[in-house]
Image: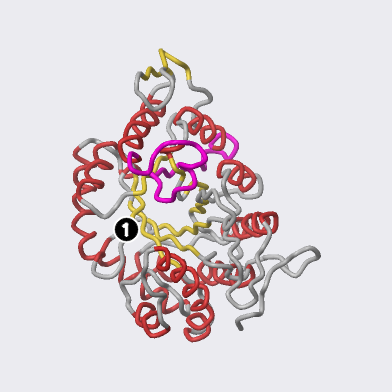
Amino acid sequence: MTLEFGVFSFGDTYPHPSTGVRQSARDSLRDLLERIRLADELGFDYYGVGEHHRSDFSVSAVSTVLAAAASITARIRLGTATTVLTTDDPVRLYEQFATLDLLSGGRAELGVGSGVFPEPFLLFGGSLDERRAVFDDKLDLLLAIDENERVSYDGTNRPALADAQVWPRALTGHLDIWVAASASEASLRRAARLGLNVQTSATGSDLHELAPLVALYRAESSAHGWPAGRRRVAIGAHGIVDTDDRSAIDSFYPHYRDYVGGMRVNRGKPAPSRDSYDTLVADRESAVFAGSPQRVVDKILHQHAIVGHDRQLFQIDWRAVPQLTQLRTIELIGTQVLPAVRAELGGSATTHPSGSNTPTFHDSTREGATHHQGVFS
């Protein structure tokens, strides 16, 4: 299988690092759909949308956003990155994504995790401290629903089911289900046993620790009888791509500084410095991919040589990165990075159905837009 390329977004509406202007939820969602449409046109394999339940992000109803995306795309797979299964109902979740799968012609993916932020627990109940046990129970039910049209359940985390029919069913009979897994032997062994694809985060020296775990995961998944399509591994990166390294590195820094700095303040840690950022960008094994297309190609190939992952993901909407910058990044990945990596790995680039690799994104200065393009040139 050739290396897949994907993007994931949360509908970032943080204030811009320089202007302090915050994008509205409406504009954020409109721009998100524009990025998904362009990624589909340029041959990306996947676009993921993750949920948050706070005013810094526009996406809380993931399946609604993905249904809108399905209506304006033709080929790209659409999934969650991730949805918090711990505070959701597996029956309702399966119904939503089986419906999305039917509407999209079999392009739906469901990525699930246990949750790390308090907001969904405050809104929907449950406890962060008990989330792992609840997640395991709900994951078992979700997988039982995926395997059987009629299910019974007598646990403690939702009302009981007695030979209940769950309808509609996914187009091919099964949903494509991924799990957000830590880079640990226990997490990957469980995913292998259950036949779940995994999305994991590992950077720096962690990549070398992840590599043997990925090999173990694939071997055990195969031993359990799961096909290749149910033992895939995705790793993620964040940053922007521009025509030259310095422009991309300089442009992304304020967004990185404010996003990571905000997270560290909450943990009693100092904000990142420019020196530490530059060191991270230069590290071929870090998850910051700011640079020219060739720099990004080299970094992906280096990391793929270590991990052998199946899907490379990019998060671009970090702390109010302007829409035109995001569209430009998607354009450069789709027209330069993706073909180069696939050629090196023996795959082939995917072209627009018309046979052209030329992007056709719209001018974000149209009436009513509130973007902040041009702040970083």
Task: Report crowding for label 1: few under 14, some 14 to 19, many 20 or more residues within 10 A (C-alpha).
Answer: some
Q: Quadrant of residue 260?
A: bottom left
**Residue at horizontal 63 percent and vertical 72 percent from the top:** 20
Residue 316 place in picture, x, y as percent:
52, 66
Q: Is residue 376 above or below residue 288?
A: below
Image x and y of residue 181, in percent? 32, 49
Q: Nearer the viewer, residue 332 or 66?
A: 66
What segment is highlighted magenta in the picture?
A: 101-130
Q: How did the renderer colour the structure?
A: secondary structure
Instruction: Say which residue label 1 marks.
Output: 309
Q: Nearer the viewer, residue 90 or 3?
A: 90
Q: Position of residue 259 (x, y in %)?
A: 48, 68
Extreme residue toward the front, this view: 268
**What residue sits 25% from the left and 65% below the top?**
206
Count of marks, rendered view: 1
Q: Secondary structure at mark 1?
A: loop
Residue 334 painted magenta: no
**Residue 65, placed above or below residue 364:** above
Residue 36 sits above or below residue 284 on the image: above
Please give left or right for residue 103 compared with residue 275 in the image: right
Q: Where, by quadrant of the figure, is residue 210 drawn?
A: bottom left
Most extreme residue toward the top is 162
